[in-house]
Amino acid sequence: MNAILLAAGLGTRLKPLTDIWPKCLMPIQGRPLLEYWLDDLKKQGFKKVLVNTHYYHDEFERFLSQPQYTDWVSTHFEEKLLGTAGTLVKLAKELDDEDVLLVHADNFCQCDFDLFVKAHVSRESNTAMTMMSFTTPTPETCGILEITNEGIVVEMHEKVYDPPGNVANAAVYLLSKEVLDKTASIQNVFDFSLEVLPKFMGRIQHWHNRYVHRDIGNVPSLLAAQN
């Protein structure tokens, strides 16, 4: 299986830290955030990982030039940001014709990736993707999910006041080729959450991460992740 890690964001909520360093390389307990993702994917046996970059591209190039990342991790610079869906369309063309892991790599995530992948492989035949979820203490800042008793996502409430619950989209997905083809068919597609996910409601399997998933998008949350 292959993966796309989205790491091109500007990290504006983390200013002034992101004036001097990219968000996805921020240190978490002494290690760059991106290193956690790559270590997990290596252990899981992912064959190829593509990392999109934009802001502080040179720092990503230096980080990924380390020997442990050669031959299976590569950067893909975007002079103009393509958006989460636009990046998926572009980079999926460079991967084998199989399911793809799509990750918003600016979150700190610790989970059992083996179980996540197994859940996707054994998902119901009428589902097209598996979405990771987590329990959030701030549901109004997340995409809150409505999930059936069978574990199917039927609605998502994106950053609304008084949302119906606290189980949120973790922005970590395992996508079938059907999803890749549908995304590519949408003209000028940009945002995966807003433009693609709604077309698959009722066909998204959810898998709940019971360990750690944390947005490090502002200074207090980045500090909290150090504990």
Image (cartoon, rainbow, N blue to C red):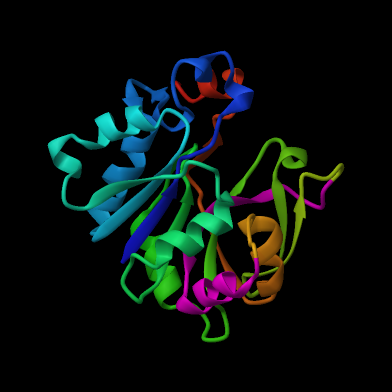
39 vs 76, left or right, is left
Magenta-span inclusion, residue 168: yes
Q: What quarter of the picture does the N terminus occupy?
A: bottom left
Expressed as whole percent of the image width and height from the top left, the position of residue 126 reads 57, 85
Front one among 120 and 93: 93
Whether residue 148 is visible here, answered yes or no, is: no
226 vs 85, left or right, is left
Expressed as whole percent of the image width and height from the top left, the position of residue 83 reads 58, 50
Work out whether 125 lies above or below 103.
below
Q: Residue furthest front?
A: 79
Tell me which residue sits at (50%, 64%) in the image.
89
Expressed as whole percent of the image width and height from the top left, the position of residue 180 reads 50, 72
Where are the magenta residues, as a range?
A: 163-187
Q: Residue furthest right?
A: 161
Expressed as whole percent of the image width and height from the top left, the position of residue 57 reads 39, 33
Tell me which residue sits at (70%, 44%) in the image.
142
Residue 100 sits in quarter:
bottom left
Work out whether 36 lies above or below 144.
above
Tell me which residue sits at (64%, 55%) in the image.
191
Whether residue 119 is visible here, answered yes or no, is: yes
Q: What quarter of the picture does the C terminus occupy?
A: top left
Q: Residue furthest left?
A: 67
Front one among 159 and 112: 159
- Total count of labels: 0
Residue 154 sits in quarter:
bottom right
Magenta-span inclusion, residue 50: no
